[in-house]
Image (cartoon, rainbow, N blue to C red):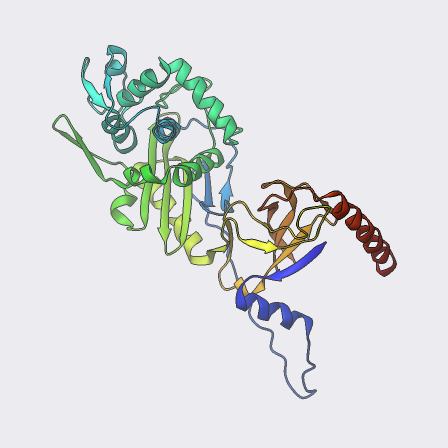
Amino acid sequence: MNVFTSIGRSARLCFFAAMVTVAAPASAQVIPQPQTIIPAAPQLAASSWILMDANSGRILAEHNSDERLPPASLTKLMTAYLVERELDRGTINLDDMINISENAWRTGGSKMFIEVGDQVSVDDLLHGIIIVSGNDASVAMAEHLAGGEAPFADLMNQHATRLGMNNTNFQNATGLPGENHYSTAHDMARLSQHIINDYPDHYEIYSHRTFSYGGIDQPNRNRLLWRDPSVDGLKTGWTTEAGYCLVSSAKRDDMRLISVVMGTGSDEARAQETQKLLSYGFRFFETMKLYERGAVLATPRVWGGDINELRVGVDEEVFMTLPRNRNEELRARLNLNPDLQAPVAVGDEVGTLEVHLGDEVVGERRLVALENIEEGGLFKRLFDQVQRFFSNLISRFTD
């Protein structure tokens, strides 16, 4: 069963306008309506980059986004994500105190400046990882959560696989160079999307410009936190092998974008190239929330159940990112299974939702049952079998 439905009043008007045409007078000059013009995405002075909408997941621009490159301290996004995950699960708490080992203290590179034998809270270590890119803090958390950096890296890789980061392999919690330590711009954007959407209670940390510990004040190295008030994260990275890298996110109105640039030539270059991507995305695209989670989109017939109609909808919020000023062209098509039979359980897939922009399919989501339907009694099932037989017979003659 295929059903077209409108998305909002403007889309409904567009749909009917497409079905009814009126001939213009012979003497009238028909002037084509201008269509939204989207320029080519900017080319950046970087090895790899990507621009993604954080809600819809649509990629708006990319270059070599699946090329495996050393991620430097972008690695710490996964380290922080796993800390946030354990906080959300309740296995650790922000005020838990962690003993700092000599191994963590000796870790080279950027530091939070914790000392051997210090008792440091999870809260402070998480701030040290995210804001000042503390390698010592990252190793301390890895030891606390997994008993050491090697088993923690194994956890990182298992979660990378779970999140669909198919071109990533971690060997440590810090991003210090390793022969088989790599990721991609695409994978880092996907990880950032999960950081933002999975654990929003902790995301505010990524916007902090400074962090002070032990009397030492250090700035966040993401220059855009000072330059662009819409930017509120996420992480910088640098090694000789990786060059200067930056994962940023910005929100303007109801639209949030994620950008990743890898392999730029300087601290200033990564900020400038990121700004080009973000400006392009916000200037030429918009993101719309089409449906709330649990929205009822159809009530198809169900055979043999204790009730006859099933409430069908989506089990997640549905966002779409599209060129600006084209929302009137949106239509939704519901492709429902034509012969639904009880029993049906909440969450069972019963079809698909297709979102069309003009003639193009720009998104697809599964349609699920929003309620349980049990089998009806014997008489109800027999009655429905007769109705179903004649309904299918009539359908064959009318097709």
Q: Quadrant of residue 144?
A: top left
Residue drawn at (70%, 81%) of the image: 23
Furthest residue in direction top, as rendered: 102
Q: Position of residue 372 (x, y in %)?
A: 60, 43
- Judge by depth and name the residue closer to the eye, 88 or 359: 88
Q: Position of residue 50 (x, y in %)?
A: 47, 41
Tell me if 188 is positioned left or right of 312 in this view. Answer: left
Query: Does residue 45 lie above or below 15 as drawn?
Result: above
- Judge by depth and name the residue closer to the eye, 310 or 208: 310
Q: Quadrant of residue 15?
A: bottom right
Please count the marks in the image: 0
Tell me if 14 is positioned left or right of 206 in this view. Answer: right
Q: Is residue 358 visible in the rendered structure shown here?
A: no
Residue drawn at (27%, 48%) of the image: 227
Residue drawn at (55%, 70%) of the image: 34
Which quadrant does the N terminus fall into? Answer: bottom right
Q: Position of residue 259 (x, y in %)?
A: 41, 43
Furthest residue in direction left, as rendered: 215
- Judge by depth and name the residue closer to the eye, 280 or 240: 280
